[in-house]
Amino acid sequence: MAFEEILAWSAQEGRPAWQQDGLRRIAVSGELIDDDLAALGKIIEKEVGLIDEEIDAGQPLSAEHLSEAVVDAPRTILGSIGPVRRVDRLAEDQPPIRFAKRGISLVYGANASGKSGYCRIAKQLCRSLSPKDLKGNVYDVTPAGPPEVELVFGVEGSEPSRREITWRPTDPSPRELARISVFDTDSARVYVDKNRRVEFLPYELDLLNKLALLAKALDSGFEARQSQLARAVMTPLPAGFSGNTTVSQVLVKLSPDTSETDLPSEAQLRNLGEWSEEKDARLQSVVREINSDPAVQIGAIKITKQTLESIKVELSTNATLLGAEGIRSLVSRHADKVTKIQAAEAAARGIGEGMPISEIGSETWRQMLMYAREFAGEVFPDRSEPKLATAESCVLCQQSLDGDASYRMAEFDRYISGRAATESVEATEAFDALVQQITALNIKTSGQVEELLAAYSETTEERKTLAGEISAEFGVLSARLEVIKSMIEEDNFEEVERLSPLQADLVQKISNDLVNLQGRIEDLERASTDGERIKQLLDEKAELEDTKRLSQVIDLIVERQKQLSELLKVKEARKQCASSPIARQITSRRRALLTDSLKSQLRSELQALRLSHIPIDLSDRSSGADSIVEIGLTAQQRIKSNSDVLSEGEQRALALSCFLAELKEVGAEHGIIVDDPVSSLDHSRMEAVAKRLVAEAASGRQVIIFTHNIVFHYMVESEARREGLPLHAEWMLSTGSTKFGIINESGQPPHQKKTNQRINEIEEAKSRLFKGGYDPGQPDQFRDGVTAIYTRMRETWERIVEEIIFNGAIQRFRPEIMTQSLKHAAFNPEEDYPAIFEGMKRCSHYSGHDRAEGLPDELPDQGTIESDLAALKEFRDVVVARKKALERVPSYEAGISPEFL
């Protein structure tokens, strides 16, 4: 049995605790909420060590949690539900809803009457694929206590046969009630799912399928966490560690590829990075000893010598350009440039005398002529020199050259190629070249030089002094460069004397000490050394330095260790969320459950619900964590989903067919509760559903139907009478927006109410009207009340015709005509027609119908209302007496009386 299979599988050794608790939650609640996911996630986190807090360890699945109908178990009878307390907004002062022991129990309630609240109770207590937790009134500001439900049920063949209990959601549902199956809109979604596939899920597969989807949801959360951690551990750790020290070998293990057993602990890392004064003193001692070794000293001195040589070259270059000699050269070239430009301008002015524009000779004018001369050489290659003057046209204005113009051009060309202009160009270029060299200098700052010479300055006091002089000299050079740049920009070198002087012999001092350093290197190279000892000291130095470095960044290193540890545990958590073991069990059980008898039964149900026109194929399949038994259409052309060709009504009827087919597998006589089974169905299929459910009742099942469809209500009544089955009706209504789930015959739809009940309601309405000080002279105030009374009287005249005169042979919303009822029909045309005609005429005058023009707007007085109602009652009494005189045998209308627990 599935009941035993799911329990055995859940209890297998090695089954994760979260799966056992998850199965329990699914069995009890159907659909899990975020709080359930959080609780199950914490069980996994506790299991893998992600958290160390005390948590609810969960509860494994047991038999009491399962809503599994057992085929050979004795039949359970649901006697009543209610009174209820603190369930939704259901009224608490109501009698229970009673259910017949056999036959049909019909519970009618309009939309928003509270019917769904009672259905949720049934789903929570009985076998349902979509149970829902009960809630109190969510609109109350202050939450009330837990819901409570009074129940009466019995088990055939057991003692005592009748049990009364008060059930709370914290209590396990009575095992016996699990033999009763519930079908509603939510259950239909299981069969016709949200992706609009038509699917069939027996109870056991539904549990396992939801568990697989739950595993996928939990894994999704851990996967996101894993991705975040994976990105975090890819950030590079602090560098600067040696390659072969104990510290570096441990830090190498801080990698995503390291296993949990190889990952160093926080305590291990902190012990490794512990630094003390003793270790610091030892490090300094080792450094001194290493530095005293000739080989080590040679390496250090060579580096120092190389740095000093580089500084010397840079200093010498800067001093050449910015020293006294360099400045004199800059000033001299500037003066030469100015002198020769002036000479060239004077020569130009000489040739300009007597010309239209005499003021010529500027540098700009000279440049223009040089470009024009070059251009003439390009465009007139075959002309004799000077091409600027011998061309046919002027290269500047494009006009023809006459004799005077040619002459002037020739004079200009001789000027450009003359000595004065040439020397001016050469002097300018020489000055500009030197300026470019100076402005391109990038002099180090004093601080940068000090840092470069730090090791050099620590060797002796003399070298410390020299390093200071070099650093200061670079500062002077930098200052001189800025002043010189300013002079060049202003084209004024008159204040050159205010430049700070440079140290004349500094380069020589550096050269002398470079000779000394080379001599020291040669002396050390001739000295002996202990290579093995130095190697030991270098290894110890590396260990100590790495330890010191680790102590400085220990918090970052420990944080990485925690991230890696968490990452490993999250990976372990994801292993617990693997859905493949669940999928294997689903596949195994799916094949066992998909029997030929189930396929045959489904085809029978489709025939009964008029769906035989739909060709189907029952098959099992998997899709990731989702595993289902699918009802596929055997279409000749490929379709994406069944809903592309099935109407909403067909899908609903197909879902009900699946539900009924499965019932044969879980017990032929166990009861069923069906909530609104005909939503979206047409008239013919509603009739088919009514016949099918009555047939289930005829087979021995207790059938309970909740509905808001009065046509379907009548259909079930008619079918029950045809089959000779007892039928019990309950009526439910709501008042305003405060009280729901009121159990009362007044909950019947108006057209369902009997004549006597209608007349009583008219009497009550009349009393309210008169009690309010009725005055027909105030139509605006009392017209609505009068219209309501006369409308009810008009409807009651019609009801007398239907119910009494024709004995219910023809009734609204009922498709059949009950011909047997005609034997008690009490119609006398000669007497009844005039009375009915006059009564309806009087009522229509005041009942809100359109009135003829010219009729007065006054309301009837109190006596008229009393008289019209008395006429209605008198006629009712006459025809009732006539009908009773005709009755000799019990009416077909009476049906069979139900029995109750």
Image (tube, helix red, strand yellow):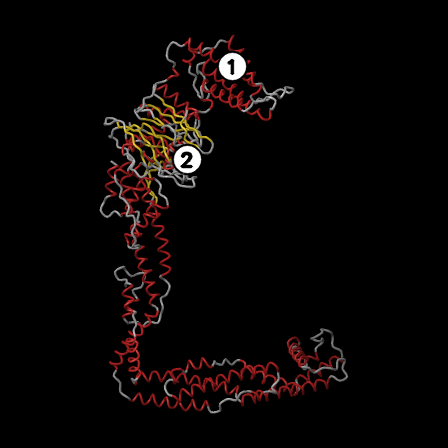
Give the labeled residue for mark 1: 870
Whether 791 is drawn above or below 56: the answer is above
Q: Are marks 1 and 2 in contact (CB under 8 Å)?
A: no
Say which of marks 1 and 2 sits in front: 1
Under mark 2, the amino acid is Arg
Give whichever of 391, 672 is nearer the camera: 672
The amino acid beneath tag 1 is Ala
Tally the marks: 2
Where residue 593 sits, quadrant-wise, is top left
- Which residue is nearer to you in this view: 548 or 481? 548
Secondary structure of residue under mark 1: helix
Q: Along the line of sight, which residue is nearer the eye, 169 or 361?
A: 169
Q: In the rendered image, which residue does mark 2 sit on?
A: 89
Residue 78 in sight: yes
> Could you tell whether 97 is left or right of 793 in the image?
left
Q: Is residue 393 left or right of residue 744?
A: right
Residue 379 in percent (x, y) is at 65, 75
In the picture, residue 638 is in which quadrant? top left
Query: Image point 26% across, 31% down: which residue?
Result: 71
At x 59% / y 85%, what residue is drawn?
Answer: 431
The first of marks 1 and 2 along the sequence is 2
Relative image position of residue 677 (x, y in whole percent): 39, 30
Note whether 371 is above or below 119 in the view shown. below
